[in-house]
Amino acid sequence: MTDKIAISDRAIVIPVFPLPNVVFFPKMQLPLHIFEQRYRQMVRDALEKERLIGMALLRGDWEKDYYQNPDIYAVGCLGSIAGVTPLPDGRFNILLHGVREYEIQEHILEQTPYRRARVVLREEMAALEPSYFESLKTEVAELARETVGERAPELIKALDDASLDGETWLNLFCASLDVSTLERQSLLEAKSLPERAARLLQVLRFQAAENRTLADRFRRGPDSKLPH
């Protein structure tokens, strides 16, 4: 399976793997270690069928209901199992390749030990206009160097990677930047690439402004106060 997966109907039933701190994006890769019995069964079932798993973010006070069916965000990302390593004790190491955003229409909590859902796949997003993509890269590069600096050299290196198309480049930064899980979920939920880019810029601009304020306070000494 690839990101050009042939799906005749955009409404499909998929297994759902909810996690507390993971937001998955199309065209990205996600390594996962599968150890819970219910999710081992999920992987075995997926390998016998279309090799598809939907990643979803847990929401709210999920800890108390983790072993049942806690709340999850409705928008997630469908992944295709691109690699799998079965381990002797029944666990798996798998690699997911992000395919498409989806939105849950109905939860299916019977028949399998893991959660499934009827979802509608988002339509494939239109590519970024070349001129907009170039201006986006310029601003993101400036802001990322200011906010990330030397803490993420591989991410900074990717700023100038001409081999990446607009969606891959944008999703790479959305998936990799040091932002909160909820901010990352908001980036995933954007309904177009320009909207996702605008949300990313908003986050980066806020981080940059916050860094400048803290740096200015440091220069002025410990008795200075942050502006209200």
Image (cartoon, helix red, strand yellow):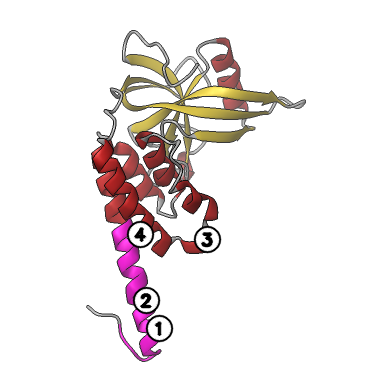
- Give how far across and how far down residue 154 sits, in percent: 53, 50
Report the disc number at residue 151: 3
- Amino acid under label 4? Leu
Contact check, label 3 and label 2, Cβ < 8 Å: no
Q: Quadrant of residue 174?
A: top left
Q: Mark 4: few, some, or many residues within 10 Å (few <14, many ≥20)?
A: many
Upstream in sequence: badge 2 or badge 4: 4
Relative depth, front residue between 75 and 129: 129
User: Where does residue 166 sit, x and y in percent of width and height?
Assistant: 35, 36
Identify the residue at horizontal 32%, vertical 43% (top origin): 187
Which is more N-terminal, label 1 or label 4? 4
Asked if the residue under mark 1 is in contact with the one under mark 2, i.e. CB atoms within 8 Å, the reply is: yes
Q: Which residue is mark 1?
A: 218
Q: Secondary structure at mark 3?
A: helix
Could you give the CA–CA distance between mark 3 and mark 2, rounded to whole angstroms? 18 Å
Above or below, 125 against 70 in this view is above
Kindly report which numbered mark, 3 or 2, lies closer to the viewer in this rendering. 3
Number of other residues with Cα within 10 Å of mark 3, as a class: few under 14, some 14 to 19, many 20 or more: few
Q: CA distance from mark 2 to mark 4?
A: 16 Å
Q: Which residue is mark 4?
A: 143
Q: What are the residue bounds of the magenta stretch?
A: 204-225
> Which SS type dominates the magenta stretch?
helix
- From the top left corner, tell me how far across and down residue 60 is, in percent: 37, 46
Query: Disc 3 or 4, which lies upstream in sequence?
Result: 4
Whether 93 is drawn above or below 43: the answer is below
Nearer the N terminus, badge 3 or badge 2? 3
Residue at the disc numbered 2? 214
- Kindly check if marks 4 and 1 are in contact, taking CB atoms under 8 A apart as contact: no
